[in-house]
Amino acid sequence: MTSRYQAPPRDVQASIKRYLIDLGLKAGDAIPTEARLTDVLGVSRGSLREALKALEALGIIRTKHGSGMQVGQLSLGGIADQVAFHSTLEGRDDLGMLLDLLEIREAFELQLIRRVAVAADQDQLDRLNGLVSDYEASTSADMDEIDRRFHRELYSQLGNALLLELLDVFWSSQAAVHPQLGEPMDAVDERISKHRAIVDAVVRHDPDAAHSAMQDHFAKTRAWFESGRA
C-alpha cells in the first residue's frame, strides 16, 4: 500500500495547482478524482479535501452538480465582495478607500474612452443613446443602476471581460457606502448632460472630446465623494 502523509494545506494546494497546469487543463475542464489525486500527490484524503475546499473558495476549482470537480473560471466576484465589505467598514468613519478606488477607475476609463471613441460602431452608439434616454426617463432611485450599465456598455466591445468585472468591483463598493455619501451633488439634469456629452463625443469619433467629457464627469464624482468624507 502506498504511504500517504498529512501535508501542510498550502503545500497540497500548490501541488494540486502544479498538477493541473502540467495536465494542460483549461477553465471548465474536469479535474481528476480524489482517489487519483491522492495517488499522484501521495497525500492523505483529509489533506487533499482540505486543500480542495480552499481552492474552491478561491475560485480555482468548482464543484458542479452531476459533473464533479472542474477548473474554475477567472472571476473577480470574491474580490468585489471583500472590497464592498471593507469599504463599508471604513465608510463609517472615512471614505479614503472609495476615493482610492475612484482614482484607479478614473485612470483607466480616461485612457479607454479614447479607444471607444475610435472603435464604436452604430449598434453600440444606439445602445448608449438608449441608456441616456433611460437616464432621462428614470427616477433618482434608478440612476445608479443605469449609470453602471452605461459605463459597462462603453467598454463592452473592447473584448476585455476582466475589465467589466473590475468595473463591477467599483460599483459594488460605491453601492455599499451610498448611505454615507448621500445623493450626488449635481442636479439630475446636469448628470444627464454629462453622460450625453460623453456619448456625443463618441458619436463624433472624437477621442479628445470624449476624454474631456469623461474627465468632467469624474471631477463631479470626486467632489461628491469628497463631500461625503467631510
Image (cartoon, rainbow, N blue to C red):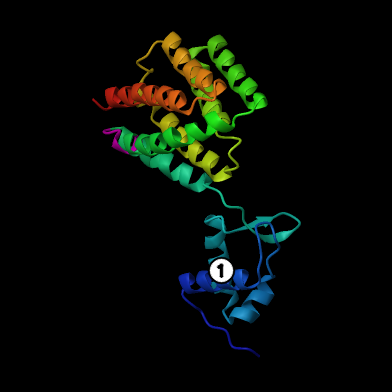
What quarter of the picture does the N terminus occupy? Answer: bottom right
Measuring from the top left, give residue 153's x and y in whole percent: 58, 29
Q: Is residue 87 above or below residue 8?
A: above
- Please indicate whether residue 192 sits to the left or right of residue 120 in the image: left
Magenta-colored span = 93-98
Q: Along the line of sight, which residue is nearer the eye, 196 or 135?
A: 196
User: In the orientation shown, which residue stands out farthest toward the right?
Assistant: 66
The image quadrant that residue 224 belongs to is top left
Q: Residue at x 47, y 35 (%)?
A: 172
Q: Which residue is drawn at 54% across and 21% down?
A: 204
* Amino acid type at mark 1: Lys
Q: Residue at x 37, y 41 (%)?
A: 86
Q: In this view, does 221 lie above or below 83?
A: above
* Residue 115 is inside the magenta segment: no
Measuring from the top left, give residue 170's x and y in whole percent: 44, 36
The image quadrant that residue 150 belongs to is top right
Q: Residues within 10 Å of mark 1 (few under 14, many from 20)?
A: some
* Residue 94 is inside the magenta segment: yes
Which residue is tagged 1? 17
Q: In this view, does 144 lie above or below 60?
A: above
Q: Along the line of sight, which residue is nearer the eye, 102 or 138?
A: 102
Measuring from the top left, give residue 63's x and y in whole percent: 66, 57
- Please indicate whether residue 122 sits to the left or right of residue 66 in the image: left
